[in-house]
Every structure is written in structure tokens, then in C-alpha cells.
Image (cartoon, rainbow, N blue to C red):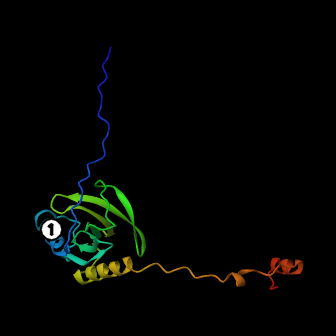
Amino acid sequence: MTERIRQPALQPPPIRPAEPRADDPSSFLKAHYQHVWETRMHDLPFVNANLQVDAIGFMRHEGDWIGVVITPWFLNLLLISGGGKLWGDIPAGERRYLALPCGALQFIADDDPDIGPYQYCPLIAPVSNLPDMSAARQAAVDAMKSVFTPLAEPPVVDEINTEKPPVTRRGFFRRLAGKRP
């Protein structure tokens, strides 16, 4: 009789809870990605050497931090836990939709040993079409404006004027023939 080897059930990746940041994460993120740029990414073929690392527009929204990180290899909208309503701990690699003033945006969870858990929405990758840092910063500023600009409300239709008069037999045949009623 052959013995079956039991495989352990697939377990979802562990979730490391985020520690809320009380202070603006801009300088911390900028320093982290600068270190990554200098130590691991500098010589890769897909980077845009015309760009530097920067963190743009980080602000609190519903208690959590949202802003844009620019690197020579991506331009991403980042969500960092600030102890607010937006953040939700999910496993790295999982996706979730966040309701923001512009509408729902998809964020991907990640967990960096130095940064900790964070979530990002890719904006531009690769960044090879950005000519310089000025264009990258403008794209980041425009992205932040877009994220925090509420969707336009659909126009209210006046129900009184929406009723169409009944079509007469003559009107029907005139329209069918391509003539005005």
C-alpha cells in the first residue's frame, strides 16, 4: 500500500500590521528610495537617469497619508498608515479599491523591511517617457490634484421637460422617411 504524503494547505501570506505614522512620511520615503536607487537600481537598463527620487504632496486624508513618490523607475501614489479610516491591513500582493474624492482607485499592498507595510497605485511605469525631473514633478502634482478633485455630479434632469409628446401616425412615417415631423 502506498502512503500518501500530506501537503500542507496553502496559507495566505502573513499580514504584518502597519504601525501608524504620526509625522509626514515624505523625508523618510525620499531617504529610503534614494538608498535603493544608489545601492540596487542605479545600473538597471529600464531606469530614467534624468530623474531623481522625490516625495511630492504627502497629506493626511481621512487620517492616513497619501502622496506621490517619484523614482527613476516609477511614479506611484502611496498610501501610508496614519491610523485613519483608509488603511486596511492586507497581505502583500493583494489589491483593494479605495474610495477617494476622484472615485475608486486600486491599490496594491506591499511590505518593505525598511518602510513597513504600504499600499501603492501605479501612476507611471516605466518612466522612460518623462524627459526630466520638472515633468515628473508636474505629473505628481497633477496626479494629486486629480485624486482630490471630486467627480462632477451628473446634471439633474428636469422631469417635467423629459416627457416626449406622443408620436402621431403621420409623424412616425415622416421620421421613417427621414423628414422632420
Left or right of 155? Residue 22 is: left
- Residue 123 quadrant: bottom left
Q: Nearer the viewer, residue 69 or 176?
A: 69
Q: Which residue is mark 1?
A: 32
Give the left or right position of residue 81, taking residue 173 as reference.
left
Q: Quadrant of the C terminus?
A: bottom right
Judging depth in this view, the residue of 50 and 181 nearest the camera is 181
Residue 80 position in % (x across, y down): 25, 67
Q: Quadrant of residue 22?
A: bottom left
- Disc 1 element: helix
Residue 173 image point, x, y percent: 86, 77
Check the picture and name the quadrant holding the N terminus: top left
Q: Residues within 10 Å of mark 1 (few under 14, many from 20)?
A: some
The residue at 42%/75% (across/down) is 102
Please report the residue visible at 23 percent of the width from the left and 54 percent of the height from the top.
Answer: 16
Tag 1: amino acid: His
The residue nearer to you, when weighing 123 against 8, is: 8
- 91 vs 101: above or below: above
Name the residue at the right extreme.
170
Position of residue 35 in the picture relative to residue 138 (left or right): left
Image coordinates of residue 100 in percent, x first then y, are 39, 72
